[in-house]
Amino acid sequence: MTRNALPVPRIVLDTNVCLDLFVFRDPLCSHLLAALERGAVQAVTRDDCREEWQRVLHYPQLPIDDQQRPAFNAAFDALIQLLPPEAATAGEDTVLPRCGDPDDQKFLELALASGACWLLSKDRELLKLDQRTRSAGLFAIRLPQLWSIADVRLHAVPKLG
């Protein structure tokens, strides 16, 4: 990074978005995959989010076999940075809204702690918190197909505090 370069905006992807990107290769997410591959945004995760990803890859209803799993994990690890615990845990001073699905609260916490500009999800319980997180100046919660690379150019990295 040069002295005048802006930091690469961070983004958090929930597990279903990761499935769309890496397993199903959903064309509605191709712009997101391209942005990640170009380094226009930096996707981040933490241990419990990555563990959920690995657990979901073993769900019997998914068309994944033991030979494919390592490639999906490698794709995830290549494009999503695992943050150390101290960088992925929010302090007590900022109050986050509570997600109706307690299993998804970790994605809100990660977005806050990492300074992400966006949390991408298809989960209704998370999406309905978008207005609250944006009005608090924290981050936006978007459907992946509605997120745009233009958002990277138009939005500054939110400042907390």
Image: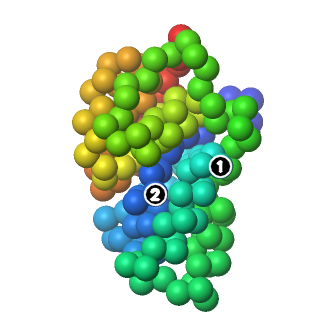
Q: Which mark is residue 143?
A: none
When the figure is inspected, residue 94 is found, relative to residue 25, above or below; the finding is above
Q: Indicate the amino acid at tag 2.
A: Thr
Disc 2 and disc 1 in contact, CB within 8 angstroms: no
Question: Which residue is drawn at the image coordinates 69% and 43% (left, top)?
Answer: 83
Task: Judge by depth and name the residue closer to the eye, 107 or 9.
Answer: 107
Q: Is residue 11 left or right of residue 61?
A: right
Q: Indicate the amino acid at tag 1.
A: Asp
Residue 10 at x, y percent in the picture: 55, 40
The span from disc 2 to disc 1 (Cα, nearest Å) is: 13 Å
When the figure is inspected, residue 19 is found, relative to residue 111, above or below; the finding is below
- How crowded pointer 2 is (Cα within 10 Å; few <14, some 14-19, many 20+) is rated as many
Question: Which residue is drawn at the image coordinates 52% and 33% (left, top)?
Answer: 109
- How crowded pointer 1 is (Cα within 10 Å; few <14, some 14-19, many 20+) is rated as few
Secondary structure at badge 1 equals helix
Question: Which residue is drawn at the image coordinates 37% and 29% (left, top)?
Answer: 98
Residue 88 at x, y percent in the picture: 64, 36
Whether residue 6 appears in this view of the structure is no
Q: How is the image coloured?
A: rainbow
Residue 18 at x, y percent in the picture: 47, 61
- Mark 2 or mark 1: name the one nearer the start of the chain: 2
Q: Is residue 128 left or right of residue 139?
A: left
For the N terminus, the image quarter is top right
Q: Which residue is mark 2?
A: 15
When the figure is inspected, residue 2 is found, relative to residue 134, above or below; the finding is below
Question: Which residue is drawn at the image coordinates 40% and 67% (left, top)?
Answer: 20
When the figure is inspected, residue 43 is found, relative to residue 139, above or below; the finding is below
Residue 119 at x, y percent in the picture: 43, 41
Q: Which residue is mark 1?
A: 47
Secondary structure at badge 2 equals helix
